[in-house]
Amino acid sequence: MTLFTGDDHAAVSRAVREAAEKAEAEGKKAGIIDFNGDAETAAHLFFKELRKLDSEKADVIFAAGIREEGIGIAVMNRMRNAADGNIVSVK
């Protein structure tokens, strides 16, 4: 999984979609995880979405990070661990 982070969620979402489009143009099956910046939803559904994309045999997964405040701190910790160092900072 590649995690995209940044202060502007719209820019992060756009970068995720562009990365997925590029991967698909290269013949890969791309999965996207984007909770529109909603930390509560991400807390409840992140692993479910990750497992779903894995079961669908996605070749690559691109995820949009969320703001690191409140529950978002724990969610981003989980997302970083899943990304295993594959993190792109979007300016």
Image (cartoon, rainbow, N blue to C red):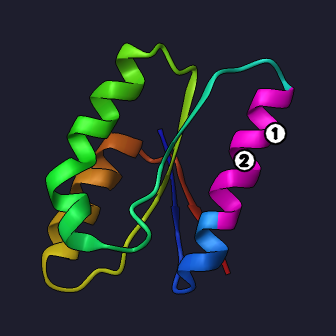
Q: Residues within 10 Å of mark 1 (few under 14, many from 20)?
A: few
Up-down relation of residue 10 to residue 7 (above or below): above
Residue 37 location in percent, x, y?
A: 39, 74
Q: Say whether residue 78 is left or right of residue 90.
A: left
* Labels 1 & 2 near each other (Cβ < 8 A): yes
Rendered image quadrant of residue 39: bottom left
| Magenta residues (range) | 14-25
Gap between marks 1 and 2 measured at Cα: 5 Å
Q: Which residue is under mark 1?
A: 22
- Nearest the eye: 30 or 87: 30
> Is residue 73 visible to the viewer in this orientation of the structure?
yes
Residue 78 location in percent, x, y?
A: 22, 52
Rendered image quadrant of residue 27: top right
Residue at disc 2, secondary structure = helix
Is 24 inside the magenta-drawn segment?
Answer: yes
If the image is split into quadrants, where does the C terminus sit? bottom right
The residue sitting at the right extreme is 25
- Nearest the eye: 46 or 3: 46
Q: Which residue is under mark 2?
A: 19
Q: Residue at x 33, y 35 (%)?
A: 50
Q: Amino acid at mark 1?
A: Lys
Q: Say whether residue 87 is left or right of residue 47.
A: right
Q: Amino acid at mark 2?
A: Ala
Q: Say whether residue 4 is left or right of residue 71.
A: right
- Nearest the eye: 44 or 8: 44
Q: How many marks?
A: 2
Q: Say whether residue 48 is left or right of residue 60.
A: left
